[in-house]
Amino acid sequence: MRFALALLLVFAVLGILLATRPENLQNDVALALPFTSITWVGPVLWMLAGWFGAGILVGYLIALPGRIGASRRARRVEKELGQTRTVKEKAVGHLNTPEPAPHPGAPTEADEMQRLADEVARRTETVKRDPPPA
């Protein structure tokens, strides 16, 4: 992670050094919007910075409805969590009661497994198996 951040910093410094060269500050660029009569004229550096800023602004505005919805859902869940905590505090008393023991004649899990294994053996004892290939 640190290496990636250092690499990004190096790229940013190189980008700034290349962007602020005298040619980029003195050469004007004309930008004409298609299907309109609007034309912007300015240095290359200011055009790049302006369009980069406009892209960040548009991205932020696009993500804004999702962030608002997420914060609304988080507030609703926090409110429900507060209600759940009060209900849980009232219901804690039943958690301290021991589980009822099964009656002595009830089959255990091991008994059920053995019963199923016996059933499978009974049903498959009449099946003839092919000898393995030689």
Image (cartoon, rainbow, N blue to C red):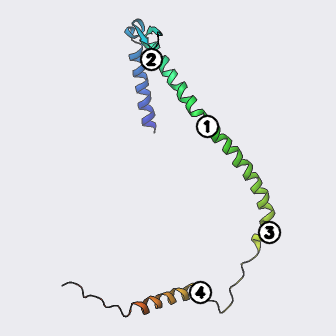
- Left or right placement of residue 108 versus residue 130 in this view: right
How far apart are the alpha carbons under marks 4 and 3? 29 Å
Tell me, for residue 133, which label it has, or none.
none
Q: Earlier in the sequence, mark 3 or mark 2?
A: 2
**For numbered disc 3, what is the local secondary structure?**
helix
Amino acid carrying label 1: it is: Arg
Expressed as whole percent of the image width and height from the top left, the position of residue 77 reads 69, 49
Amino acid carrying label 4: it is: Thr
Question: Splitting the image into 4 quarters, where does residue 94 fall?
Answer: bottom right
**For numbered disc 1, what is the local secondary structure?**
helix
Identify residue for label 3.
93
Tell me, for residue 108, which label it has, or none.
4
Q: Earlier in the sequence, mark 2 or mark 4?
A: 2
Name above or below for residue 80 compared with residue 6: below
Q: Earlier in the sequence, mark 1 or mark 4?
A: 1
Please rate how many residues cluster around mark 4, counting C-alpha atoms within 10 Å: few if below 14, some from 14 to 19, many from 20. Answer: few
**For numbered disc 2, what is the local secondary structure?**
helix
**Which residue is more in the foreground, 82 or 37?**
37
Expressed as whole percent of the image width and height from the top left, the position of residue 83 reads 77, 54
Question: Splitting the image into 4 quarters, where does residue 105 fall?
Answer: bottom right
Amino acid carrying label 3: it is: Gly
